[in-house]
């Protein structure tokens, strides 16, 4: 049988791709990241019509959560959750968590409480199908380049939380950070909690360094521990108390981050999912 040039090229690609994938750590990293983003954009195509039936509604967050839950299996990432009991609060609350990478979405979807929406940078709204799905699920978009706008959106959110029984998830570092610790906190999340007089619940995801490193272009399988810390109450606090509140929560989170990130894989109590 004679192979045409196109067929030869196809054969070479089919052989070269898996070889390169296994041999080159950075090629594997790029493939896995490209597939991660591409897969989310594709899943969003499925999510959009389902969400659109209800219109823009926080309940749609459950649809996105359901759609994304399997990704940890595709990537061989084990997620161990500790402290579930700390989410057993009926009233609304503000969740604050550390932000290492877009992979945080996996830990977030693992534990996302009902009626809880993240605050995201406005640019995400324009990320094609994913942006539309986020909008339909009630994600709160802020313009980080306009402080006044961002603050007024968050003040409005304080009102919505109470009126519509909604919880809000904020990344107080304000940007992705893979430095091995936590950046200084922006204070919006804490103003939000104080304005609504609702608790702040810190969530800490352990360092991804064993399986993921953007700098080294490394992305293997691995394990991540997610710890839900006890809520910090804000009843009776005013905006003057915000800096102290933010510092206190950050200290708690750094301590938990250091502790769960230094454990050897497979050790420590918790529930595997
Ligand atoms: C199937 C498809 C699925 C797809 C699913 C995708 C899921 C989506 C997942 C998405 C994940 C996406 C994740 C992401 O996208 S993460 C990126 C976006 N998130 C954030 O930036 C959140 C954290 N940022 C803040 O909290 C900032 O403070 C904000 C944004 C509010 C302003 O920041 P900015 O840098 O402009 O200013 P500043 O922080 O210096 O503050 C200036 C002053 O204002 C004070 N101040 C602040 N707030 C309030 C307030 N409310 N009432 C009264 N005052 C307030 C503040 O204390 C300070 O005063 P002082 O303290 O210096 O005196
Ligand atoms: C037709 C337009 C096509 C656009 C393609 C865009 C590709 C994006 C594809 C999928 C979106 C995946 C959703 C991942 C959600 C995680 C969001 C995230 O982690 O945002 C980063 C933000 O917290 C902080 O941003 P910076 O670290 O300050 O930067």
Image (cartoon, rainbow, N blue to C red):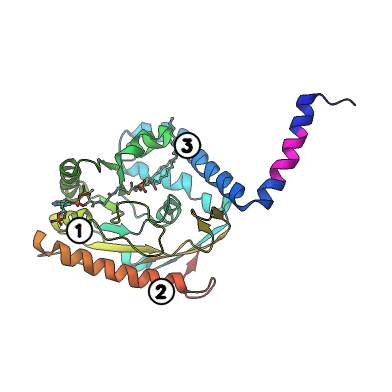
User: Would you name the residue on which mark 3 appears?
Assistant: 41
Q: Residues within 10 Å of mark 3 (few under 14, many from 20)?
A: some
- Which residue is at the front of the view, 142 or 6? 6
User: Would you name the residue on which mark 2 appears?
Assistant: 259
User: Which residues make up the magenta segment?
Assistant: 11-18
In reply to whether residue 12 is colored magenta, the answer given is yes
Mark pair 3, 1: CA separation: 32 Å
Whether disc 2's CB lies below 8 Å from ligand 1 is answered no
Tell me the SS state at disc 2: helix
Tell me the SS state at disc 3: helix
Whether disc 1's CB lies below 8 Å from ligand 1 is answered yes
Q: Residues within 10 Å of mark 1 (few under 14, many from 20)?
A: many
Which numbered disc flags the more N-terminal residue, 3 or 1? 3
Which of the image's four quarters has the N terminus? Answer: top right
Residue under the image location 21 percent in, 46 percent down: 164
Tell me the SS state at disc 1: helix
Whether disc 3's CB lies below 8 Å from ligand 2 is answered yes
Up/down of 96 relative to 148, above or below: below
Q: Which mark is residue 190?
A: 1
């Amino acid at each position: 049988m004679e192979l045409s040039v196109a067929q030869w090229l196809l054969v070479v690609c089919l052989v070269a791709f898996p070889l390169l994938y296994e041999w080159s750590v950075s090629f594997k990293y790029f493939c896995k990241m490209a597939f991660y983003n591409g897969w989310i954009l594709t899943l969003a195509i499925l999510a959009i019509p389902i969400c659109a039936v209800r219109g823009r509604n926080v309940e749609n967050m459950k649809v996105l959560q359901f759609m994304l839950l399997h990704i940890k299996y595709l990537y061989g990432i084990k997620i161990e959750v500790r402290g579930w009991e700390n989410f057993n609060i009926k009233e609304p609350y503000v969740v604050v968590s550390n932000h290492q990478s877009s992979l945080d979405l996996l830990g977030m979807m693992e534990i996302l409480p009902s009626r809880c929406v993240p605050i995201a940078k406005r640019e995400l709204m324009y990320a094609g199908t994913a942006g539309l799905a986020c909008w339909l699920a009630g994600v709160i978009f802020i313009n980080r380049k306009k402080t006044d706008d961002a603050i007024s959106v968050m003040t409005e959110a304080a009102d919505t939380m109470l009126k519509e029984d909604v919880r809000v998830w904020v990344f107080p570092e304000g940007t992705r950070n893979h430095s091995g610790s936590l950046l200084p906190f922006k204070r919006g999340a804490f103003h939000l909690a104080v304005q609504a007089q609702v608790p702040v619940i810190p969530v800490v995801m352990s360092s991804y360094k064993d399986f993921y490193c953007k700098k080294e272009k490394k992305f293997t399988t691995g394990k991540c521990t997610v710890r839900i810390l006890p809520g910090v109450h804000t009843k009776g606090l005013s905006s003057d108390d915000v800096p102290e509140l933010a510092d206190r929560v950050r200290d708690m989170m750094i301590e938990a981050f250091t502790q769960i990130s230094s454990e050897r894989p497979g050790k420590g109590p918790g529930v595997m999912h």
